Image (cartoon, helix red, strand yellow):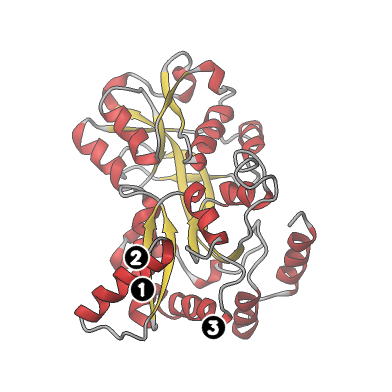
Amino acid sequence: MKTGKKFIRHIALSFLMCTGFSAQAEIVVMGGNPHGSLFYSMSTAIGATVTKHSDLKVDILPQGGSVFYPMMATQEVDFGLVNPIDALAAHSGRPPYDDASSGKGFRMRTLMLGSPIRLSLVTTKDSGITSVSQLKGKRVVANYGAFASSSVTSAAVLASHGLTTDDVEVVTVSSYPEGVRAVMEGRAVAAVGSIGSGIIRELDASRGARILAADVTPEGIARAREFGQSWSPIRVQEGLPGVEKSIDVLSYAITIVVRPDLADNTVRKFLESIWDHHSELKSIFRPLATWTPDRFASTQAVIPYHHAAIDFYREKGVWTAEMKQHQSMLTNQRR
């Protein structure tokens, strides 16, 4: 029986041949997050754009990084849409990835940085909760099991207000969408909320969603950054589902990583497709309107860039002396 990437490629190729797509298409696999998450919608839109404008066929694996990082090592997954805080922990072999990688970390390289993601904790309008500080002693989804990035987000938002997971009654789930569903079903008072995600819209339609503001004072951000240096404050204007008035939340630049041993030509095709056709992304999924080439090569990267991406950015004139220095700093760090 075919397993892993071979099985994915076999199924995809059979489908493509039935629909008249070229059998010469190279099938690549991109890790996204589960259905209902913002990352899943983003990865689907990005994959569709690459498939449309190249001879690559991008299949989306709807799993979090804790699942697909090891699959990059075995060449079952080629690309991944990631939280840079979580990805750096995996790359460096730090908790919660120390045991899974035997402390060695999972090898990956940065392809591009994209839109900022906006995160905080979400509750329902009828909960009576209007501040994160009011969650003390309440049931909060703060353990996402293998879906480690949301556990980090929960801890960072709580920390911004001077709370820890010891201050709340921790509810455990297995994925980001399941956390919001726990709030929807009354099993928890609050969970991690990604502004603009489908599951937040679902919560808002069923019970009314309320995104809680993070503490973005210098002290609050310093506390959040104990759970990852990539956290930055961002202002969210009222009108989006769950946002009753303009608030500040936590943010980081969403990143696409690639396994370092992927063929240079494949890396280039993927990157070139998005560079040349990024304007189409917003018509597929509106939050990708800010996924623009001026963000791709950035000193906000926390993992070294793939060498084929560096060559591409040099040709485009965006690989500056500052980027070269930043890349050198990253490569001189562990792994």
Image quarter for residue 313? bottom right
- The answer to whether the residue labelled 2 contacts the one labelled 1, judged by CB atoms less than 8 Å apart, is yes
Residue at label 3? Answer: 265
Q: Amino acid at mark 2?
A: Ala
Q: Is residue 12 left or right of residue 159?
A: left
Q: Secondary structure at mark 1?
A: helix
Q: Quadrant of the C terminus?
A: bottom right
- Would residue 320 be visible to someone looking at this image? yes
- Residue type of the residue flagged with mark 1: Thr
Q: Which residue is mark 1?
A: 49
> Where 110 falls versus 246 (above or below)?
below
> What secondary structure is marked by label 3?
helix
Q: State the residue lying farthest toward the front.
A: 1
Q: Quadrant of residue 246?
A: top left
Residue under label 2: 45
Neighbour class for label 2 at 10 Å: few (<14), some, many (≥20)?
many
Label 2: which secondary element: helix
For this view, does 111 lie left or right of residue 121? Answer: right
x and y, in percent, of residue 68 in the image: 48, 54
